[in-house]
Structure formats: structure tokens, C-alpha cells
Amino acid sequence: MTTRPPATTAASGAAQDALPASVAIFAGLSASLVAIGLARFAYTPLIPPLIEAHWFGASDVVYLGAANFAGYFAGALSGRRLGARFSNRTMLRLMMALAALSFAACAVPVSLAWYFGWRLLSGFAGAVVMVLVAQTILPTVAPARRGLASGAIFMGIGAGIVASGTLVPLLLGSGLAAAWLGLAAVSALLTVLTWRAWPAHAHVPPAGDGEQRMPASVRLLYAAYAAVAVGLLGAAVFLVDYVARGLARGTGAGAVYWIVYGAGALSGPLLYGLVADRIGFGRALRLGLVLSGAAALLLAFVPHPAALGAASVLLGAFTPGVVTLMIGRLHELLPGDTHAQHAAWGHSTTMFALCQALAGYAFSFLFAHSGGRHHVVFVASALALGAALLLEAASATRR
């Protein structure tokens, strides 16, 4: 009797590991869609209905939006430790379920504190998924195909952005509560479908002194990723408002460019992954930074529809695409050291989350004190992306 449980556990693990890599990739795509794509980006089109339905005031709705960023930072700090303690597979399952539950809870406007708490938890779930998902799935994929696989996993972020511009307006036709419940239903369905799809290989324990062992090239890459967080936030927050009010083209036109941005985000991870498999992750990352910086300048100075469309696609593609490139770049800089790779990605995500939260407030301040001039924000974004390019180039020369 003492030998049967271990045998059963081993058989179960073997069965999980025997699953095709494509099944695990689908689980990863679903997790990024639910916990990041929907949990963060579906809130944007829900802001006007929340105000119009008098669930919350305008200032409160913005405050609630910031709760997701705060939760994301908390999740980035603790995600790796939680995965080590409870296993990556367990935490990924629970975070998808938590994101689904947060949608259902937001269907009832109990109070501002209630909403803040659930938005905080949704951000927490997204960060834990971001920290753990690639490190859980990529070991099941052949090294030569990991760029493509990583891109497929993070396509879920782009799918969430597309859904925020298409699915949410349809759900709102049945009311605000129905929209939240519809998002909860979609998330719950994906959670159930992927419950047994996660690989069961051993998790990577946290390192007590991983930061001290990191080479200079990796530390420079942390700084580059932090600058990317600042550079990408301008379009993510102000694109729709720029088109609708800044260019006086109306909310309908703003929504169109948001969908274009989402289409770029949907294809970006996969395209950047394919490029990285051919030319290397470092070169692909530098290419993405150049294109994104140019796109931010297009937004600032060329309001022609074609330029706006190109800029929306390029910035949308790089928003989740940089995740694929950063993970791959860390693997290039720390070849064969799974322990260090996992630690470095956790530190990178924490830096990104912190600078993203700080940049949100900084850009709001800059926008308000520039008299509402959007191009000031987009120039600041371009400068941040330029700084990221310089830092990545410096990283490439260090070992």
C-alpha cells in the first residue's frame, strides 16, 4: 500500500508530460488571454458605461483602473515564490480561476472598496501568469521552435485587446452586469478546458541570491525592459482619446484605431517569435524597439490616417511581442541555466510592473500640465523607447 500512491502520481505526471506541446501552448495562450488580455484591457471599453450607469464617478473609475496596475506589481513580486511553493501548474490554474471570479464579482457594484479589491486581484493574477506561464511551457518545446511557441502563448494578450474592442460592445447590449458576466463565462470556460493541459514537470525553486549572480548584460536588460514599460504606455492609454478628442474625429474613429492596435497585438508575438527564430532574439528586440520608437513619433507628428494606422499596428504588435523577445533574450544571455533564466524573468517582470505603474501617473501628470497635448506624451514614449534601445545595445556588448 505504501508504493501505490507514488506510482499513481508518477503515472499521472507521465501522462501530463506525454501531452503534445501544442496542448500546453494552448493552455498558455488561454491563460494570457484571460488573466492579462481580458483582465486588463477589457476594462478600457467598460469605463464609459461604468460612468454612464452611475455605478461610480469618473475619478473613481480611473482610480479603479489603477488598482489593476498595483495588483500586477504585487503579483510580479510574489509569483515566482508562489510557483515554487505550490507548483507552477497549480498557480496557473488558480490564477485563471481567480480572474474569472473577479469578472463575476464586478457584475455587482457593492462598493468602491469591493471593486478595488477585485480589480487588484485581477492584476495580481495577470502578473503571476506572466511570471510563470512561459517558464512552465517552453521546456516542453524544442529549442529551435521556442520563439514561435512563446509568440503563440502571448497571442492571448492581443486576443484580449481585440475582444475588448469587439466582444465587450456586443455584451454591453444586454447591460453592464451582463457584460461582466459574459467575460466571466468566457474565462471560466477557458479555465475548465485547460485545467488538465498544463505540464507537470518539476517547478524551479526560487534563488536566494539570484540577483547577485546575474551578469551585467542581464542587469542592463532589466533597465531596458523597464524603459519599454514607459515607452509603450503612451499609446495604450492615450491612443483612443487622441483620435477621438485630440484630432476631433469622434469616439467611433477612436474605437477603430483601438481595434487596429489590437490586431497588431494579436499578430505581434507570433511574428516577432518567427523573426527571432531566424535572426536571434537580441537583433529582433532591437528591430522592435526601432519600429516602435518610429511609430510613437508618427503619432506625435503625422496625424494622417495611414500614419495613425501604421503606428497603431506597430505599437500594438510590440506591446505583447516584447514579452516573447525578452524571454528569449534572457535565454540567450543565460544559456542552459534554467534556474537563472526563471529568476531573471521574475526580476524583469517586477521592474516592468513597477515602472509601468509609475509611468501611468507620470504620463497623466505630463498630459494635464501640458494643456492636454497628446503629442507631448508620444514624444516622451519615443524617448523612453530610444533609451531602451541604447540599454539593450549596451547589454549586447557585455557578458
Image (tube, rainbow, N blue to C red):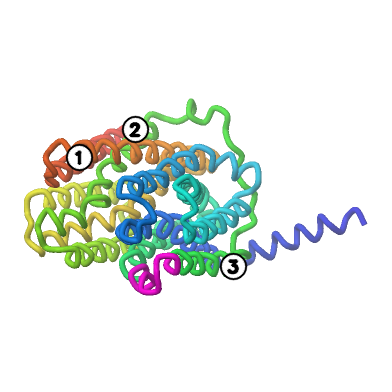
Q: Earlier in the sequence, mark 3 or mark 1?
A: 3
- Picture quadrant of residue 222: top left
For residue 298, side relative to residue 11 (left or right): left
Mark 3: few/some/many CA within 10 Å (<14, 14-19, 20+): few
Q: Nearer the viewer, mark 3 or mark 2?
A: 3
Q: Where the C terminus falls, by quadrant?
A: top left
Residue drawn 40% across and 65% down?
176
The x and y percentages for residue 348 are 41, 39
113 w.r.t. 268: above or below: above
Q: What count of labels does the image hold?
A: 3
> Magenta segment range?
167-179
Q: At label 1, which amino acid type do we have?
A: Gly
- Residue for badge 3: 192
Badge number at residue 220: 2
Q: Nearer the viewer, residue 10 or 387?
A: 387
List the single residue furthest toward the right. 1
Rounded to the nearest angstrom, the CA distance separating label 1 from label 2 is 14 Å
Mark 1: few/some/many CA within 10 Å (<14, 14-19, 20+): many
Q: Main secondary structure of the magenta part?
A: helix
Rounded to the nearest angstrom, the CA distance separating label 3 from label 1 is 42 Å
Q: Where the N terminus falls, by quadrant?
A: bottom right
Q: At label 3, which amino acid type do we have?
A: Val
21 w.r.t. 219: above or below: below
Residue 83 lies in magenta, yes or no?
no
- Picture quadrant of residue 59: top left
Q: Are marks 3 and 1 in contact (CB under 8 Å)?
A: no
Mark 2: few/some/many CA within 10 Å (<14, 14-19, 20+): many
For label 1, the SS is helix
Q: Nearer the viewer, residue 1 or 170?
A: 170
- Residue for badge 1: 386
Rounded to the nearest angstrom, the CA distance separating label 3 from label 2 is 40 Å
Residue drawn 61% across and 64% down?
195
